[in-house]
Amino acid sequence: MDSKEYWKQNAAMPKGRLKGDQWLPRHIENIPPNANVLELGCGEGYDTQYLLSKGCKVISTDLSQDHLDKTKETILRMPKVIGETIDSQLMLLDLTSETDWKKFADSCYDVVVASLCLHYFTPQQTRQIIKEIKRVLKPNGKLFARINSTNDLEHGANDGTPIENENNFRLTKDGTKRFFNKHDIQKFFGQFGGIDTAVERTELYGRKQTKKVLWEISATSDKLID
């Protein structure tokens, strides 16, 4: 099963949430007021909800229509404040599709948010996705992302079969998954321009509250698109 099929089949299943998930509040001081935000892999819309609550204008994207529908439900449950408007759009996006990325103009967004959606791809696809993120960001725009760590043993690190002679890119029962160490972060995100922070964190994930080891990255685009 490839990753696209895996996410389409599993989108309708009840999902957990990283317990006490406060990752975006750690970065809010670097998100401009009324920022234009492109969110990749919005899932059930929890990050969408937080960003909207802070006054951001958000385009939330996902490969799954079921996820977009759940994000819409999450937005509709937000408390309504008299005099305030919620600026939100929902769009299907295949991160590997050149055609889908053409929906987004150059230098349009202050921030791109990508939580646990950038670690399913071949080296070529990963580099191209990061290149597209750079393209759509304004000069000095920010990327905030979370990706699998090579220490994420309870979620597939070291499971399955290595692909293309890459030990950290593996075919697991859930499809292809990439797991990052410090070297991999520099190899793939170094082209972005500037990695501001890369912190390895352990969170509790899903309804079973298993340990999830991930990298939390912030980076600034220098607009040097190769």
Image (cartoon, grey):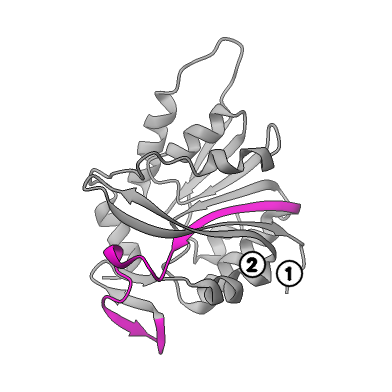
Q: Which one is in front, 104 or 179?
A: 179
Residue 207 vs 132, above or below: the answer is above
Answer with left or right where residue 81 lies relative to residue 34. left
Q: Residue at x 48, y 72 (%)?
A: 181
Residue 208: x and y in percent read 21, 48
> In the picture, residue 7 is in which quadrant?
bottom left
Cα distance between the residues tagged 2 and 1: 7 Å
Answer with left or right where residue 97 lies relative to residue 71. right
- Type of amino acid under label 1: Ile
SS class of the residue under badge 1?
A: loop
- Type of amino acid under label 2: Lys
Q: Residues within 10 Å of mark 2 (few under 14, many from 20)?
A: some
Q: Quadrant of the N terminus?
A: bottom left
Residue sitting at the far top: 82
**Mark 2 highlights which residue?**
131
SS class of the residue under badge 2?
A: helix
Give the label on residue 190, or none. none
The residues colored magenta run 140-167
Residue sitting at the far bottom: 165
Q: Quadrant of the C terminus?
A: bottom right
**Mark 1 highlights which residue?**
225
Residue 124: x and y in percent read 53, 78
Query: Magenta stretch: residue 164 in it?
Result: yes
Q: Residue at x 30, y 67 (%)?
A: 153
Residue 218: x and y in percent read 61, 55
| Label pair 2/1, CB-CB below 8 angstroms | yes
Q: Residues within 10 Å of mark 1 (few under 14, many from 20)?
A: few
Answer with left or right where residue 211 lies relative to residue 111. left
